[in-house]
Amino acid sequence: MQKKNIIYALTVLFIILVFFVFRELPIKVETVPATVSLPRITWINSKPDTERFAQTQVHIRNDTGVTLVCPEKKLVFPTEDILCMKPPRYSPSYRNPCWYPDESDKLSCLPYFLQIGMSKCATTDLFTRLILHPDIIPISGANGKNKSITWWNLRLTGSTWQPPYSGGKRENFKQYSEYFSNAAKVIETNKDQTGYHGKITGEGSPTYLWMLYLWNRIPQNTYLTKPKVLVPHLIRHVLPKTKFIVTLRDPIERMYSSYHFFNKDKKYDKFAFHETMQFAIEKFMECKAMKGDRQCVLDPDLRATISRKVRLLNSMYYLYIKEWLDVFPRQQFIFIKMEEYVTNKEEVLNRIFKFLGLSTLSPTEMKKYGLLFTTIKNKTKGGKQYEPMLNATREMLYSLYDPYTKMLPQLLNDPSFTWSKVSYEEYVQRMLRKKVAS
């Protein structure tokens, strides 16, 4: 009998212990300062079963309707949790998002604008001209370049371009801000008579727009089969008022340029190219039938199957832009047609400067600051070997892209974002003219 009593007492004690260990703790509400337009954060602390974010119950609710998960303490996870980080409080004396970190007299800055895409749409040429404006301060980017950092997708998550996408260089938020340290010094030392610092800096990483398929490396998406959080959500949390520059071109021509860029060391064969496109399209259609088009453009396995060198999906502009416009308001974006930029650079550049809140430049000023150089930056190598694709290939690609292209004008609230289909004869003549011009 005594033995039974001891067992009973131990059982009751164990139940009480489990109750206190796993019970929910009190709710704590933390409100972001009114000067910064950010989501309200509600913390509901609970003991995690394992060292993973998915076991905690901390939610962020914002106007995008996304419910996010944060840890109650620092847990073991390879990617820094941006959404659970308290954003900087930017100084109103600066046009650019800048602040003085706690107990530091060194100014830190982040980009005022991001050029997020689309790849192979003259993004390098455009960015090179933009940063020649006297009020735009270049950065010290990755690999010594003043354009692309790719922090929000690759470096934050330690990802690589190739499957399985792991093993890349991982950098934290402080390291990201250091890319703008030289620009911060210039911005800080330049101010008007009222003490306002009007100069800005920016980053040009065209992969941001479309490289959303690394979503499973974001802590809040751990164990999920569909993403709750994408790159736009991370940026919104830290840079809610940033401005975005997006350049688009004819979807088929963009894909063709991309193919030649990544296969410039191989001899081009139009029949082999047709088979490659046919295989890629078939894989996408199979995926679409099972998961839907959104899930397919976000599917890292499909990317790996199609191959990095065939960026077929990138020309489905609608699917990517919609993800960004679901998070940021339309007025924070400027969309440029590459065809218009190529033929009217001065007007397009001034339109962007005006969008950024900067002074426009006269032709004389553009010449003075070097914006009107004639060499095209980062032009696809091997362009002289271009030849027209088969008409069957072109028709196949047109059928793939057309439904998404037709939805663009309404999404962007701009009827000009269409590309007319020309006859095959006219297409061939265009390609021959480009070949001669190159």
Image: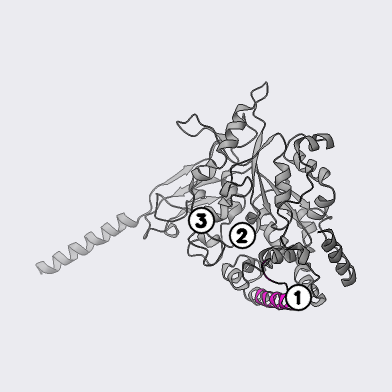
Q: Residue at x 27, y 61 (%)?
A: 15
Q: Residue at x 61, y 68 (%)?
A: 303
Q: Which of marks 1 and 3 is in front?
A: 1
Residue 125 image position (x, y, % from top left): 73, 49
| 143 sits to left or right of 194 | left
SS under mark 2: loop
Q: Examine the rendering and report whether any part of residue 333 can be seen.
A: no
Residue sitting nearer the eye, 148 or 102: 148
Residue 136 rendering spot, x and y as whole percentages: 68, 37
Residue 201 placement (x, y as % from top left): 64, 39
Q: How far apart are marks 2 and 1 (CA)?
A: 28 Å
Q: Mark 2 points at which residue?
A: 211
Give neighbour class at mark 3: few <14, some 14-19, many 20+ (Cα, 10 Å). many
Tag nearer the camera, 2 or 1: 1
Which of the pair 335/48 is nearer the observer?
A: 335
Give the label on residue 157, or none: 3
Circle 1: is it few (<14), some (14-19), or many (20+) Cα within 10 Å? some
Residues rendered magenta in the picture: 265-284
Give, as a three-letter code, the residue at label 3.
Answer: Thr
Amino acid bearing label 2 = Met
Secondary structure at badge 3 equals loop
x, y percent for residue 12 = 23, 61
Q: Name the residue under label 1.
A: 270
Q: Is 144 above or below relative to 227?
A: above
